[in-house]
Structures are given as structure tokens and as C-alpha cells.
Image (cartoon, helix red, strand yellow):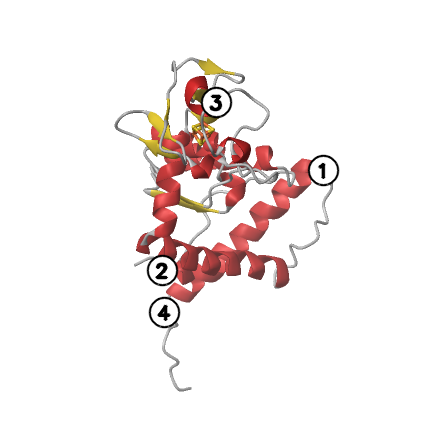
Amino acid sequence: MVDVENAIIVDVEATTAIRQAEVLAAKRMIQRSLERFDLYPGRILGDSAYGSAEMLGWLLYEHGIEPHVTVFDKSARADGTFSRGDFTYDHAEDVYRCPAGKILTTTGTPVNDDATILYRASKHDCQACTLRSRCCPNTPARKVPRSIYEGARDMAREIARSWEGRTSRRLRKKIEMLFAHLKRILKLDRLRLRGPNGARDEFILAATAQNLRKIAKLIPMPALTPA
Ligand code: SF4
């Protein structure tokens, strides 16, 4: 059972509100917590800002940390044709199965950013397919891209559907209330010092104040002796 009420902030890093900067800051904080305190998280809770395939891959494959993170996935198509989610990935065979039950295979060669692998249907299957207008109306055969980190995304999706995932989401809400407290009570909703260094100093001071408040609650009050 995690005691959120008495949670202590072990690291702080101020960033601009840009996804990439936030992801980089999260990676740095995880590394620092490990080096300074020998703290190695078994799981990470986060919203979709930390749910890119690359970040999930970094957590799971490089550090063995369970991603209890909302998956960031833009693969849904808006034009009514089948999205990647309509294709089923077969882990054992390393192929996709399309809605018509045909197989999409890959050569395994990464493309574009070296982090994507293409799975292709056979031209023969697609040309004869009755679902073609809903799948690949403008190309001879359907291609489905898959990130090399997609396995980590699949695991994050699986966790999200599980009892542990639901517990983590409740826990995350409680942790976010601590941040709300920082904003409302410690007035961190507006920074007073200028520049990145000023922001960093203000966040460190606020985290220190928050930690001291919690530590003070753990120290028993001395019994009052009558005068
Ligand atoms: S068009 Fe090709 S990939 Fe799409 S459903 Fe038909 S056979 Fe499968």
C-alpha cells in the first residue's frame, strides 16, 4: 500500500511546458534518484505526456520500470478507413492480421526515424478484398507502421486495463492533489523569480517546504507539562 499522504519529493526539475522537455526532465530525475539515493522505481505513473513509444521503451527496455502511463497514440485515422487498432498483432509470429483475416509481414528493416517498421499486406490479397474501400482505397496494398517500442506500448495498454492500472490512476489523482496544494497554498501557480534558474530555485524551495511540512507531521508532539 502506498502512503501518498506522507510521500516525500526526492527530485525537482523545472522545464518549459513542452512534451519533449518534460520527458527529458523525467528521465534525468529517474537517473538522479538512482545515483543519489539508490532509489529504483518499480513503476512510473504518468499521463499521456510520458506515453510516447520512445519514452515507454526507455522505461521498460532500458530500466525495467513498469509503465503505468496513459499511452500516447496518434495512429487512429480520421477518414473512416481502418486504423492500426483494427489490425491484430501476433507477437509469436511477428505479423499483423487485417480485418479480412489476411497476414501483413515485414522485412524488419527500420524506416524513417529508424524506429518504425512497416508491415505490408500482399497486393494480391488487397486487390481482391471486399473491404479495400475501407482499408487502402488509394494504394495497391495496405501498410501498417509499428514502432520498435510498440511492445512497451502494448504492455502499458495492458496495465491500464488491469486492476493495478486502475489502482495507479487513483493514486495518481491523489499525487496530483499534492501538486494542487503546492500551487494553491504555497502559491506556486505564478513564479516570482525570472528565468530557468529562478524557476528551479522556486521549485526546490517549494518542494523543501512541502517535505518539511510532512516530516514535521511525523514527529510526535512533546506532551505538555502543567506549569
Ligand atoms: S485491403 Fe488488404 S489489408 Fe485491408 S482488409 Fe483487405 S486484405 Fe486486409
Q: Earlier in the sequence, mark 1 or mark 2?
A: 2
| Location of residue 107 by image quarter | top left
Judged left or right of residue 32, residue 186 is: right
Residue pointed to by mark 1? 195
Q: Residues within 10 Å of mark 3 (few under 14, many from 20)?
A: some
Q: Residues within 10 Å of mark 1 (few under 14, many from 20)?
A: few
Residue mark closest to the camera, 2 vs 3: 3
Quarter holding the C terminus is bottom left
Residue mark closest to the camera, 1 vs 4: 1
Give the Cα separation between the discs numbered 3 and 1: 59 Å
Give the Cα separation between the discs numbered 1 and 2: 35 Å
- Residue 220 numbered mark, or none: 4
Give the Cα separation between the discs numbered 3 and 4: 76 Å
Q: Amino acid at mark 3?
A: Gln
Q: Earlier in the sequence, mark 3 or mark 4?
A: 3
Residue mark closest to the camera, 1 vs 2: 2
Foreground of the two, 225 or 190: 190
Q: Is residue 31 visible?
A: yes
Q: Is residue 208 above or below residue 27?
A: below
The secondary element bearing badge 3 is classed as helix
Contact check, label 3 and label 4, Cβ < 8 Å: no
Q: Amino acid at mark 1?
A: Gly
